[in-house]
Amino acid sequence: MSFQVLRSASRTARAFLSSSRASAAPCQWRTAAAATATVFRGSARSLSSICERADYKSTSRGWVYGALSIPAAVYMLQDHQLHAAELERTFIAIKPDGVQRGLIAEIISRFERKGFKLVAIKIVVPSKEFAEKHYYDLKERPFFNGLCDFLSSGPVIAMVWEGEGVIKYGRKLIGATDPQKSEPGTIRGDLAVVVGRNIIHGSDGPETAKDEIALWFTSSELVSYTSNAEKWIYGVN
């Protein structure tokens, strides 16, 4: 990599730093590092070798600030490379009312448009005993029996979705348990009316997701693959 390219990267970072002065917040340093990384477009190894060759003592203060952004850029590149390891999975089920109303494609498309990846799907009619296992944490509630009767009343689309923050954001896509309290734009807010027929279920946390996926799917039914869209969603090459 030429000295001219390195100097150009330094000017980019230095211009940002001079505008934010010495009190730059951590997020501003990340912005400067991102600008530097954009100019280099190289590997972490090549960036590190440039840092070693740079003669910091003989340069101006502004040049030092720019050069110091390089290690941060290296960190960001490495962080992107490890991004796939941060993806999580959640369990989503379209309940019998959602299936009977013909909302399967509508619900799947909302998760797909968000950028989440479908890694398992099947249609099943759960038994009453299976429904009781699924809702075991609600067994002390007065509506437990009716809830299990409803889940086992017809076909259910069981799915596993994968993505960054899919558990928490999946719940946002679904909306509040009571459709009347769900925001417009959510699945329940747009498509359901009463709490007893709220179309869809989604895991409410990492441990619940793990347990529900294990209950509904065997390990052989979960598919691991790289989607061609991931580089456009996460910026990972």
Image: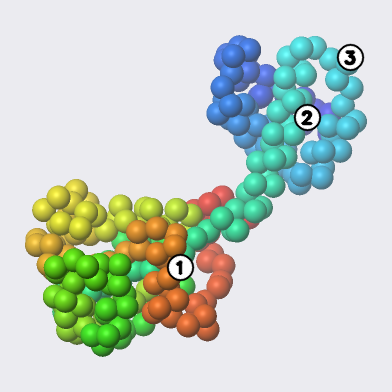
Mark closest to the chain's N terminus, 1 or 3 = 3
Residue drawn where x is 35% and y is 59% of the image? 204
Residue drawn where x is 69% and y is 40% of the image? 75
Graded by Cα atoms within 10 Å as few (under 14), some (14 to 19) or many (20 or more), the crowding at tag 2 reads many
- The picture places residue 187, in percent across and down from the top left corner, at 22, 59
Q: Which residue has dot 2 on it? A: 6
**Residue 233 numbered tag:** none
Residue drawn where x is 59% and y is 18% of the image? 24
* Mark 1 element type: helix
Q: Quadrant of the C terminus?
A: bottom right
Q: Quadrant of residue 160?
A: bottom left
Mark closest to the chain's N terminus, 2 or 1 = 2
Which amino acid, by three-letter code, is at mark 3? Ser
Query: Which of pointers 1 and 3 indicates the residue nearer the eye?
Result: 1
How far apart are the two marked residues, 2 and 3, measured between alpha carbons? 15 Å
Q: Quadrant of residue 49?
A: top right
**From what the image shows, is residue 237 above or below residue 201?**
above
Horizontal arrangement in the rendering, residue 232 relative to residue 39 (left or right) = left
Q: Nearer the viewer, residue 47 or 126?
A: 126
Counting every numbered tag in the picture gives 3
Query: Which of pointers 2 and 3 indicates the residue nearer the eye?
Result: 3
* Mark 3 element type: helix
Residue drawn where x is 18% and y is 72% of the image? 144
Query: Which of pointers 2 and 1 indicates the residue nearer the eye?
Result: 1
Q: Which residue has dot 3 on it? A: 58
- The picture places residue 173, in percent across and down from the top left corner, at 30, 55
Q: Which residue has dot 1 on it? A: 210
- The picture places residue 210, in percent across and down from the top left corner, at 45, 68
| Residue 102 visible to an observer of this rendering | no
**From what the image shows, is residue 42 above or below residue 25?**
below
